[in-house]
């Protein structure tokens, strides 16, 4: 399902060194184990690949009019948000680099929520920026040691309180409760379709102040 896509973009102002950007992306993406995961479609098993063939799709829009660029951008954003990932085949990250002008480039990234979230992307955005900036000056970015969630899992599994916690939750959910039938303004469709809309409403400042 595309409902779990995590798309975002980064704008680069000024001349862009494409090769250094590619190196920075590869370094940051490969150093985080979660971004190298894929998942079995038939059983609860995940696989950690030693390397992942990340591909960067590039577009050159600098000769297009502003209206044409806006249309292309809308189409690309729609594609990133609506194209589902195949969890059993990595990578679960997609990269698109758009050249809008000589001094403006935009990197569009989309990943599945099973391997990342907003907090994770903020961390990686910072690391990409630090790595790229350091490379421009010939230096090496001083990034923190990347943790291993597999090691953390092994350590957690060996703790005595882990079994007691699991035992507690097994008792709580020994019988699965019935789903909540919350009131809705329309009947639920037989198959979830993810149709929806966004409404923007501005509250009066006094109302916001009272709510706070």
Image (spheres, helix red, strand yellow):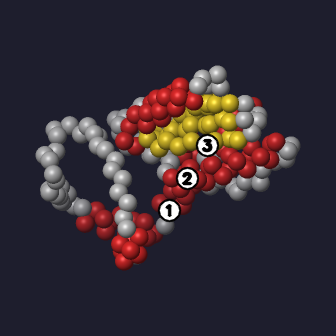
* Relative height, residue 90 to residue 63 (above, below): below
Residue 10 tag number: 3
Name which residue lies at 31% across and 44% down: 197
Residue farthest along the top direction in this orientation:
63
* Relative height, residue 108 to residue 31 (above, below): above
Name which residue lies at 45% across and 46% down: 113
* Relative height, residue 19 to residue 200 (above, below): above
Look at mark 2 in the image and give the residue it sits on: 120
Give the spatial CA distance, label 3 vs label 1.
Answer: 36 Å
Marked residue nearer the N-terminal end (3 or 1): 3
Dot 1: what SS? helix
Name which residue lies at 85% across and 44% down: 137
Side of 139 where 185 appears, left or right: left
Give the spatial CA distance, label 2 vs label 1.
Answer: 21 Å
Q: Give x and y (percent) for residue 21.
A: 71, 37
Mark 2 and mark 1 residues within 8 Å of each other at the beta carbon: no
């Amino acid at each position: 399902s595309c409902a779990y896509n995590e798309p975002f973009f980064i704008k680069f102002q000024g001349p862009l060194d494409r090769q250094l950007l590619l190196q920075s992306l590869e370094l940051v993406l490969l150093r985080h184990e979660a971004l190298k995961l894929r998942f079995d479609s038939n059983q609860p098993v995940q696989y950690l690949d030693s390397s992942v063939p990340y591909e960067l799709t590039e577009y050159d829009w600098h000769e297009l009019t502003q209206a044409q660029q806006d249309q292309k951008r809308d189409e690309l954003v729609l594609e990133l948000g609506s194209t589902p990932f195949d969890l059993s085949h990595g990578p679960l990250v997609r990269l698109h680099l758009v050249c809008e002008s000589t001094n403006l480039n935009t990197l569009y990234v989309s990943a599945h929520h099973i391997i990342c979230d907003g907090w994770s992307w903020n961390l990686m955005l910072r690391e990409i920026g630090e790595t790229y900036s350091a490379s421009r000056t010939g230096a090496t970015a001083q990034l923190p040691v990347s943790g291993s969630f597999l090691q953390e899992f092994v350590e957690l599994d060996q703790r005595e309180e882990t079994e007691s916690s699991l035992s507690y939750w097994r008792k709580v959910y020994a019988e699965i409760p019935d789903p909540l039938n919350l009131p809705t303004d329309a009947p639920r469709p037989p198959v979830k379709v993810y149709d929806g809309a966004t409404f923007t409403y501005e509250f009066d400042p006094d109302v916001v102040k009272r709510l706070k």
